[in-house]
Image: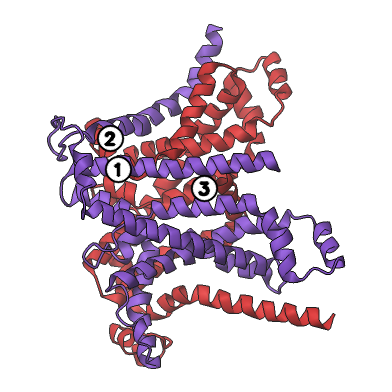
Chain colours: A red, B purple
Amino acid sequence: MGRKNNKRTILSVVAIILSAIFLSPLFIVLTNSFKTRKGIFLDVLSLPFGEFFNPINYVIAFERLNFLNAFKNSMLITVISVVVIIIFTSSAAWMLVRTKSKMSTFIFFMFAGAMLIPFQSVMLPLVRWMGILGFLNPRGLIFMYLGFGSSLSIILYHGFIKNIPKELEEAATIDGCNKFQVFWYIVFPLLKPITMTVAILNSMWIWNDFLLPQLVINRAEWHTIPLRMFFFFGQFAKEWDLGLAGLTISMIPIIVFYIFAQRYIVKGLMEGSIK
Amino acid sequence: MKNSKFWFFTFVGPVLVTFIIVVIIPTLMGIYFSFTNWDGINHNPDWIGLSNYFAIFERGGDFLDSFVFTAKFAATTVVTINLIGFGLALLVTGKIKYSNAVRSVFFMPNLIGGLILGFVWQFIFTNVFSHVGGVLGLDFLQGWLATTATGFWGLVIVMTWQLSGYMMIIYIAALQNIPKSLIEAAEIDGATSWQKLTGITIPLVAPALTIGLFLTLSNSFKLFDQNLSLTGGGPFNSTEMLALNIFRTAFVFSQFGRAQAKAVVFLIVVAIITLTQIYFSKRKEVEM
């Protein structure tokens, strides 16, 4: 028994050391973000105390990033896109499962097959084509997120709905509900677990996405957080005092979200990987 | 019957039309443009047949260099990410203290966007590595990201740091599905830890291993954000991966037709990787 306890202690210590190594890059960025540029240059491993303590970095970075504006843009685009994706893909997947026809099967396989297409192989014609349609703006971006998010979301909903019995729906139809009512009042509430997964997967992707907004959004006032960070770094290259404060600010929302929704995030990302 | 068709298209129509406009039409346009001399401005480019494809496969071309670099990178990260991810999964399922907190830490890098992570690590490699190298007198910690080799390993480290926790979660789920009775039976028969690992654990998590390997492979092949913010393809484009190469061919050199030919080849390679994964996963399912 003693040997087993020893082994357990050793493994615990190893795990804690490894966690410290995993966290160290973020910790070093955090400590240095509170220092002057000279403080960073002289000793990058020192803690931000004494003459090099310089929290004003945050005020400057926050202003130059126009962070509140970028946060608002990221938030609006992510939330609206995710809601739109949930509404349209859940209802479409339900109809695809409940309709037994060649057309229905074909449409499902078209969505599933598109999972093979990497974004970079369609981005050039996409930008030209969206330009013609006048979609190079936040509204167009949300439209494109629905298009690119539809495949995975429909596959996930499709797999889930297949296992729901349809007796309830039939009973509701006999009681005089139309399809909208059946879907919204009977089916949609049953989809809650998979809706959480779809919501998490799509929000993580859209929140962190850089390339699509970079191609679609051409006005500074519409920039999302990753986009604003990219231009911020282009402008203040090697001004690490500001850069690190900016990086820290931009990571705060996702880390706060992680602390509160960890269980759902881990579960959601796992289910998404297995499909 | 008419009625049911009406409802079918009311529910499926909006997302189907969006999908066709956003995904299907650009894919077809892309294939067409790869056979033209499209420059991004002229809306009616000329048909030039296979010229773009011949050009991108010319010996000593930037595309082949990118291809080789990307393949090496993907081959390396597949090994590092899955080894470390599997190791972490074994570690945190081994009845350790603070197991949940430790899992959260390993998983966290996975949530932060690739662009931001690239900038974080750029600071670590250029400032922290050189400082530590100076203090400890270790020359190999100097000048990171300034050479092709350190750029390569820098990308490998960032990607491994980011994705191992994700693989860990996949492997934890697989490890928890192993029946306890099997392990106990082996213990009664006097199996060593190593024998239990190679005789029971690894064969039983093989399906998850297939998922892990291919997920890492296709993620590494498609890498863009980290590449852009960590090395920017430098020095001298020697760490430019496929996605960044396609992007630059179009937006820096205005050779949209040629970039699109690269994009079509890219599509084929990624599709083959994914289809192979599906083939192996399905075969495993039948065996189980």
Q: Where is residue B4 drawn, in percent x and y? A: 56, 12
**Relative to residue B196, is residue A206 depicted above or below?**
above
Residue farthest to the front? B59
Q: Which residue occupies 21% across, 35% down?
A: B50
Q: Amino acid at mark 3?
A: Leu
Q: Which residue is mark 1?
A: B263
Of badges 3 and 1, the one in the foreground is 1
Q: Chain of mark 2?
A: B
Callout 2 secondary element = helix
In the rendered image, residues at marks 3 and 1 fall on the same chain: no
CB under 8 Å between discs 3 and 2: no
Q: Chain of mark 1?
A: B
Q: Which residue is mark 3?
A: A201
Q: Which residue occupies 24% across, 70% down?
A: A236
Q: Where is residue A274 drawn, in percent x and y? A: 58, 46
Q: Which residue occupies 52% across, 27% down?
A: A92
Q: Amino acid at mark 1?
A: Ala
State the separation of the CA atoms marked 3 and 2: 27 Å
Tell me the quarter of the picture where residue B200 sits. Answer: bottom right
State the separation of the CA atoms marked 3 and 1: 26 Å
Quadrant of the rendering where the N terminus of chain A is positioned: bottom right
Of badges 3 and 2, the one in the foreground is 2
Q: Which residue is mark 2?
A: B30
Residue A159 in sight here: yes
Tell me the quarter of the picture where residue A265 sits. Answer: bottom right
Callout 3 secondary element = helix
CB under 8 Å between discs 1 and 2: yes
